[in-house]
Image: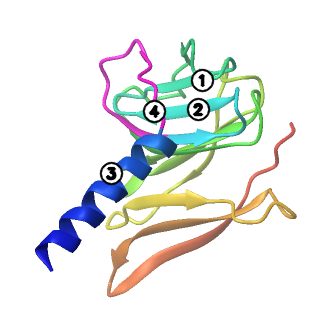
Amino acid sequence: MPRILLFLAILFSAVLNVYAQWELQNSHTTADLRGIHSVSGSIGWASGAHGTILRTTDGGLHWGRCAVPPAGEKLDFRGVWAWDAQTAVVMSSGPGDQSRLYRTTDGCAHWNEVRRNTDKDGFWDALVFPSAADPKNGVLLGDPVRGRFFTAEITVDQHD
């Protein structure tokens, strides 16, 4: 039995080496990155600590630093969702009103606040826009508050 497990482990490792072709990229930031969303083979967005938001339009060869959303320098952006190179939302996580949503429609030059957590005990964890057929409607998920997980439907218009 141990020989079979060893064989399977070696085989699995070989298969992963064939299909998982990862390429290291330099983001040119020292901030901890926490969120990533790939729109296509060339467009991607990343988010992280200290108001960090990055965007690539060339498949990751170059990552540009985005403008920091208003009052976002100390926020921890753990979620990002994008529709194209111009339009995205970022979600910060933190207690109470440190959990926020911001939207850009101009390639991250400017951000507008979409929503702010009003529950002092709340803490947002994730966002998702699950339907390609209805891409403007999504869901926010958060830590339990008073014994119930936080969920909220959100609508984000991709155009001004």
Q: How is the image coloured?
A: rainbow
Residue 63: give x, y in percent of width and height: 54, 16
**Marks 3 and 2, Cα distance to the nearest angstrom?**
30 Å
Q: Which mark is residue 27?
A: none
Q: Could you tell which of marks 3 and 1 lies nearer the N-terminus?
A: 3
Q: Is residue 19 left or right of residue 89?
A: left
Residue 106: give x, y in percent of width and height: 77, 23
Indicate the secondary structure of the residue bearing disc 3: helix
Front residue of 47/101: it is 47
Q: Which mark is residue 55?
A: 1
Dot 1 amino acid type: Arg
**Marks 3 and 4, Cα distance to the nearest angstrom?**
14 Å
Residue 35: give x, y in percent of width and height: 46, 42
In the displayed orientation, state which residue is furthest to the left: 2
Residue at image mark 4: 22
Dot 4 amino acid type: Trp
Q: Mark 4 and 1 residues: CB-CB less than 8 Å, in contact?
A: no
For label 4, the crowd category at 10 Å Cα-Cα, with few meaning under 14, some 14 to 19 and many 20 or more, is few
- Residue at 56% x, 58% y: name it: 127
Residue at image mark 2: 45
For label 1, the crowd category at 10 Å Cα-Cα, with few meaning under 14, some 14 to 19 and many 20 or more, is many
**Marks 4 and 1, Cα distance to the nearest angstrom?**
19 Å
